[in-house]
Amino acid sequence: MKIKTFTISLLAFLLAACGSKASFSTQDEEIWQAAETISVFQPPAGFEPEVTVEFKEYTLVSFSGNSPQSHLYLIQSQNEQDESRLSAVLNDLLPGASDPKQRTTVLENRPLIIRGEPGTLIISQGINGDQLRYRQAMVQFTGNGGPALLVYSEPLTHWNEDTLNALLASFE
């Protein structure tokens, strides 16, 4: 968690140094406010606000879980044209696709309804830099301010479909 927070802090600093206005916060209240600009939702038990970064038309919100490998990210763009960029990234992830550099494999593309609209949940599995197996869920949706992406990751030993389903159902 410290390394990720440091990296995001460094990114915000560099963007500011280059003349780009980026705001960065680790304050719980500000993280929740940024999250609600994307969607109201209930993170899984044990997940706590970690950081938010706002840069140009983008908002990133991060929550960390009980283990260092448990993460929940929300990313939103206020630019409607970015919806096609998010779609292109998700469409590249076909069932059974594998990238040896990323060490992940897509297990499933699952249709679902999120915030009242149809979407596709992509479930993948891989090995992280610490050589731990993890599972990840990604879904594109329409946030309160534009196209958004949810990324939820847990170590394989902590993965629970009921927890994932409750998270997805909580999005308003």
Image (cartoon, rainbow, N blue to C red):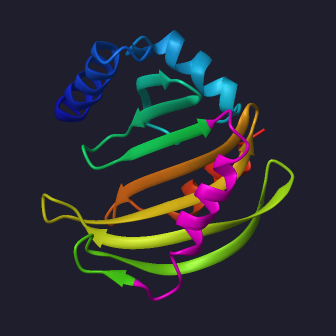
- 44 shown above or below 127: above
- 144 shown above or below 80: above
Residue 78 in the figure: left or right of residue 52: right
Where does the N terminus fall, quadrant-wise? top left
Q: Is residue 70 visible?
A: yes
Where does the C terminus fall, quadrant-wise? top right
Q: Position of residue 46 (x, y in %)?
A: 42, 36
x 30%, y 71%: residue: 126
147 or 106, which lies in front? Answer: 147
Residue at the right extreme of this rendering: 116
Q: Position of residue 79 (x, y in %)?
A: 68, 37
Q: Position of residue 92 (x, y in %)?
A: 52, 75
Q: Quadrant of residue 158?
A: bottom left
Query: Is 112 contained in the magenta span?
Result: no
x 49%, y 31%: residue: 61
Write down the region rendered in magenta: 77-97
Q: Is residue 165 visible?
A: no
Residue at the left extreme of this rendering: 130
